[in-house]
Amino acid sequence: MLELKNIKKSYKTGNFTQHALKGVSIKFRKSEFVAILGASGSGKTTLLNIIGGLDRYDSGDLLINDKSTKKFKATEWDAYRNNCIGFIFQSYNLIGHISVLQNVEMALTLSGYKKKVRKQKALEALEKVGLADHAHKKPNQLSGGQMQRVAIARALVNDPDIILADEPTGALDSKTSVQIMDLIQEIAKDKLVIMVTHNPSLADTYASRIIEVKDGEIVHDSNPIVDQKETGGKVHIKKTVLSYFSALNLSFNNIKTKKGRTFLTAFAASIGIIGIALILSLSNGFQIEIDNFEQESLSQMPITISEQAMQLDEETLTEQMDQITNSEAKYPDEKVVKPMTSALNTMVHTNVITQDYVDYIKKLDPNILGGVSYQKATALNLITQATDGTYQKIDTGSTQLDMWQIFPSSVNDNEVGIVENNYDVLAGEINSDQPGLILQIDASNGVNSTILENLGFSTNEDISFDDIMNKEFKVALNDDYYQQVGNYYIPNNNLESVYNAQNSMTIKITAIIRGKEDKVLLTNGSSVYYTSSLVENIIEQNKNSAIVEQQQQTDYNIMTGEAFSEDLTKETWLAYLGVDSVPVAIYLYPKDFDSKDEIVAYLDAYNENKSSEDQVLYTDMAEMMSTLSGGIMDAITVVLIAFSSISLVVSSIMIAIITYISVLERTKEIGILRALGARGKDITRVFNAETLIIGLCSGLLGLGIAYLLTFPANAVIENLSGLPNVAKLNPIHALILLLISVTLTVLSGFIPAKMASKKDPVVALRTE
């Protein structure tokens, strides 16, 4: 079954060549106990290593069941050692950081057996050598004889055809040696056992065949095979593989023996993660605060589409600054006046808002809008009764106090809009479909006295919510409010009769609202809003009124008798009187800044391929705030992360060094694994698994420490700025940092791991 044909092997050291084997040819029987005798340096161990596939011959051939191994690949030699060979070493070669049972299981692990089967077979092998009771001990808890029995159990567990024993009793006392030799002799009854020894009496006592080697040649064979017919048998060798889980388990057990060093390594490697995690926590927290502030700002500064749009683009601002800073054109000596156009004039664009554009706006995705309002030019003509019993017309044109704005409506009933997100309703309810008024009070429940007096309330004392909600207001319709005098119309000065007119609309303040406590910008003032349905009702009632019909047939202003002009067109005046028209302004309230970008892109798309006069531009006062705050925050974050990343580079170098030290420390383990059939890539996997564990520990440790540090950091920030719980690590950021930690450590240990896989198993086994 095993045959060597003219095997030659040499070693070179500088210019010197050592011929270890000089054309050795020998055949072995399927089951016999062969002892190879020879002095040190005779080549017997080299012969054993070549038979075991640990070393490669220079020339000749090694045949297994008449199959040549000349073209064996590295993985085939690994599989050959695992399936066909069982090694028994003089120094036992057990892996110290795993149990006896795990040592015996290792060959089965490489063969791909399932855990339950591995354990059963390993226990049976230990039972054969009388060590089943010691299965869960570590090798250093056993005597020399017991460790050699473990080595024998490991050699037998995979049921190999050949057992190779290299001075199996060299480190044992005579009594233990006899026990071990008796055990090996028993094994030889149904297997080929090849034992290397320099003890002739041991060979004579136990071996069925003795081969003597001298200077790399066979000088004597006590029982040679003279004539043996070729069997023509085929060799079926199962490929070996060390699973990732097994590699992790092996590395984890090794790491457990070096807890202190592993902790210090993980801590040092985690410093960069700690720094970056803290920076991201602060950045995330501040960004949340900025986003909240920006949301408040957006509610006060919507995207406005009106008749006059202000464009604060970079080019215009640069031109304006050039005019201010251009010193060469200043203080000329000429006695002339130079006409010039201010760059500010170019910032203003006149829009023509058409029904087509309004329809385009209404197609906006409701999921990106927090609210929307359409400002109409229609007059409200509100009349109230004051506390002294007199009647007064409410001045709805007081813009200096931010009065009389149309209240934004939520556009998506299934989601919380700008109203629900920004205001607390203290009384009544907000219903855009109900004609009425809405009173906004400030953080102290205050309302500007001018507003209250305009609404007909006394400002000498506090006013209850009930009194405000029960107060009635009348909307005077055109036919009651305007009186015809000849060919002209004038307002009716008898406000009491207008107030009590049968057709007047009665409305009330339907809701009292206050900005939410965290919406600072919304709690600093008071306002009066009206619902969109109120305007729609007024237009519906007034569009067929007498004054409207008369004005439509007349080319001059029927109230003043003056001709219409560019400043006051007939269409504008009809809109004021209540003819249904397109809005004079549209206010779009984005849900957030990301949504704002989508809205802006949608508005810009309308202007594509249109002339400048036909374009409808918008005013976006929040854009500068968004760009400035976001840009500064991102820049600060990037700079701080760049500095913290230096420690990641340093820790990566340190991990590489630690892994290299681990390779040196585990060199013998590498040799043992290779002797059991582990492939080079399996060895790489073992050390990659070790760096993976360290990287995982480092990342988790870093994130844990960073999380704990957020508590004192938040305390300091709150003390300085009044902002609580600013530092908040985003879970996604934490996961990314953990992946970075693992990736960097694995990459750092990759070169040492590859170095480990390239180690000569023969040399590795000799390492102490």
Image (cartoon, rainbow, N blue to C red):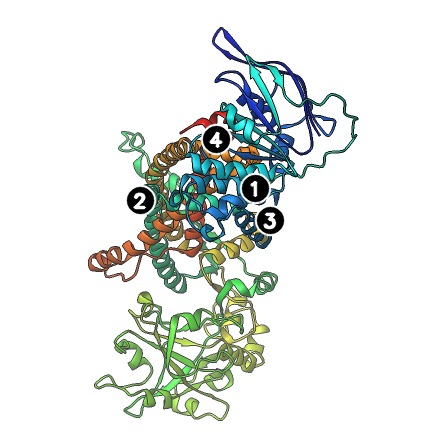
Labels 4 and 2: the sequence-earlier one: 2
* Front position among marks 3 and 1: 1
Position of residue 131 in the picture relative to residue 121 (left or right): left
Measured in 3D between alpha carbons, the distance from the residue under mark 4 to the one under mark 1, in whole angstroms, is 19 Å
Labels 3 and 1: the sequence-earlier one: 1
Which quarter of the image is occupied by the N terminus?
top right
* Front position among marks 4 and 1: 1
Residue closer to the observer: 296 or 549: 296
Q: Secondary structure at mark 3?
A: loop
Q: Name the kind of residue labelled 1 in the image.
A: Ala
What label does residue 107 carry, if any?
A: 1
Q: Quadrant of residue 732?
A: bottom left
Measured in 3D between alpha carbons, the distance from the residue under mark 4 to the one under mark 3, in whole angstroms, is 69 Å
Measured as percent of width and height from the top left, residue 256 is found at 38, 47
Q: Secondary structure at mark 1?
A: helix
Q: How many marks?
A: 4
* Front position among marks 4 and 3: 4
What label does residue 610 carry, if any?
A: 3
Measured in 3D between alpha carbons, the distance from the residue under mark 3 to the one under mark 2, in whole angstroms, is 72 Å
What label does residue 756 carry, if any?
A: 4
Q: Residue furthest top?
A: 15
- The answer, for residue 55, to whether it is visible in the render is no
Q: Residues within 10 Å of mark 2 (few under 14, many from 20)?
A: few
Labels 2 and 1: the sequence-earlier one: 1
What label does residue 684 carry, if any?
A: none
* Front position among marks 3 and 2: 2
Q: Name the kind of residue labelled 3 in the image.
A: Lys
Labels 3 and 2: the sequence-earlier one: 2
Residue closer to the observer: 470 or 504: 470
At 48% from the left edge and 18% from the top edge, which residue is drawn? 40
Measured in 3D between alpha carbons, the distance from the residue under mark 3 to the one under mark 1, in whole angstroms, is 78 Å
